[in-house]
């Protein structure tokens, strides 16, 4: 399991800018047997900024590598990459979302975020992942604003054999949440995942709709939703921080799911996002297949993004 997980992380994050992976990759760059010099450090700095690690993380990594270089003039790329991974793990301490509890029955997860972030596919993939772990799940299609949303989530539910409660375009999202909760309880399912609308986060009507969904759920279960996760498009990098602040202020978030990390040049942005928001990252999307949504692991992330093995 861990080997598969590590491989997915490494393959997805390998695409974090050609310059970045050339510096830390398994062939060429400072990993290719040569010792570090001033040129290597400049290339490293460029790569870290290019990967959207941000000023603080980049400075800390560079400072520790430079300090190590003063002590060991023959410092090689492998040692530098290990230092980088160590710094990254330290800065992201506490970033892993804890496993879902089994105390709440059902456990209610509300996914929020702007259009295009991948909420609908993430909802389906989460249900698929939990089913694979032996837990039963049901999807609630609360994005009744976007015309194609129902068809999209129905297609995913049929493909993955997941129970779904949906209504028509323009239906009241709170009513769908009510029906979905009633269904998950009556059918004895353990997890309810609600996919919500994603109009621009500056629109007050979206936030009011989300608050209504929360009120409806709390009338049925005073502790629901147990999780409110913002689904963030990883290709936006740290540009998504302001978006997250608005949702957190107006709706209240308990965690993040970061999608579309495969192919992005900003794989380092997870450090900046966590550093700013201090919200745990529960899952990351590393590809288009259902199995490409994986639980977030700081250790796996740090090693993979610096081109290290599973040592």
Image (cartoon, grey):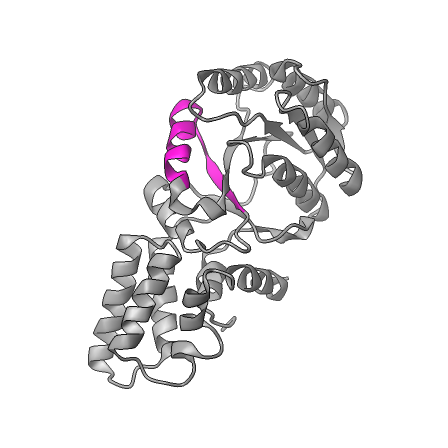
**In the rendered view, does 201 fall on the left or right side of 6?**
left
- Say which of 48 and 4 sits in front: 48
Q: Residue at x 53, y 17 (%)?
A: 209
The quarter of the displayed image where residue 187 is located? top right
Percent position of residue 200, x then y: 48, 26
Say if the magenta span includes residue 257: yes
Viewer can see residue 97: no
How many numbered discs? 0
- Say which of 268 and 84 sits in front: 268
- Say which of 142 and 106 sits in front: 142
Percent position of residue 82, x then y: 38, 71
Percent position of residue 69, x then y: 24, 78
Q: Is residue 221 above or below residue 274?
A: above
- Say which of 184 and 250 sits in front: 250
Percent position of residue 89, x then y: 38, 59
**In the rendered view, does 13 fall on the left or right side of 105?**
left
Quarter of the image with the N terminus is bottom right
Viewer can see residue 129: yes
Q: Is residue 249 above or below residue 272?
A: above
Q: Is residue 102 above or below residue 299?
A: above
Say if the magenta span includes residue 301: no
The quarter of the displayed image where residue 31 is located? bottom left
**In the rendered view, does 133 fall on the left or right side of 252?**
right
Q: Is residue 220 above or below residue 98?
A: above
The quarter of the displayed image where residue 298 is located? bottom left
Residue stretch in magenta: 240-259
């Amino acid at each position: 399991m861990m080997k598969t997980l590590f491989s997915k992380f490494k393959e997805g994050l390998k695409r974090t800018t050609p310059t970045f992976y050339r510096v830390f990759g398994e062939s060429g760059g400072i990993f290719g047997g040569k010792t570090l010099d001033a040129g290597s450090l400049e290339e490293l700095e460029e790569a870290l900024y290019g990967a959207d690690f941000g000023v603080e993380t980049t400075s800390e990594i560079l400072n520790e590598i430079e300090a190590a270089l003063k002590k060991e003039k023959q410092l090689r790329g492998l040692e530098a990459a290990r230092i980088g991974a160590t710094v990254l793990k330290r800065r992201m301490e506490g970033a892993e979302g804890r496993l879902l509890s089994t105390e709440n029955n059902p456990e209610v997860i509300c996914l929020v975020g702007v259009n295009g972030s991948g909420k609908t596919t993430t909802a389906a993939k989460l249900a698929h992942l939990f089913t694979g772990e032996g837990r039963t799940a049901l999807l609630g299609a609360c994005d009744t604003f976007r015309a194609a949303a129902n068809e999209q989530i129905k297609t995913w539910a049929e493909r993955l054999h997941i129970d779904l409660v949906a209504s028509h375009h323009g239906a009241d999202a709170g009513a769908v949440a009510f029906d979905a909760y009633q269904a998950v309880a009556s059918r004895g399912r353990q997890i309810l995942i609600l996919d919500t609308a994603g109009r621009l986060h500056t629109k007050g009507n979206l936030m009011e709709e989300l608050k209504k969904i929360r009120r409806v759920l709390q009338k049925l279960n005073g502790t629901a939703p147990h999780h409110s996760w913002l689904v963030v498009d990883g290709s936006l990098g740290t540009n998504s921080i302001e978006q997250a602040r608005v949702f957190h202020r107006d709706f209240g978030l308990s965690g993040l799911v970061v999608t579309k990390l495969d192919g992005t040049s900003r794989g380092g942005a997870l450090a900046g996002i966590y550093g700013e928001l201090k919200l745990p990252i529960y899952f990351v999307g590393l590809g288009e297949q259902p199995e490409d949504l994986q639980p977030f692991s700081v250790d796996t992330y740090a090693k993979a993004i610096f081109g290290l093995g599973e040592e």
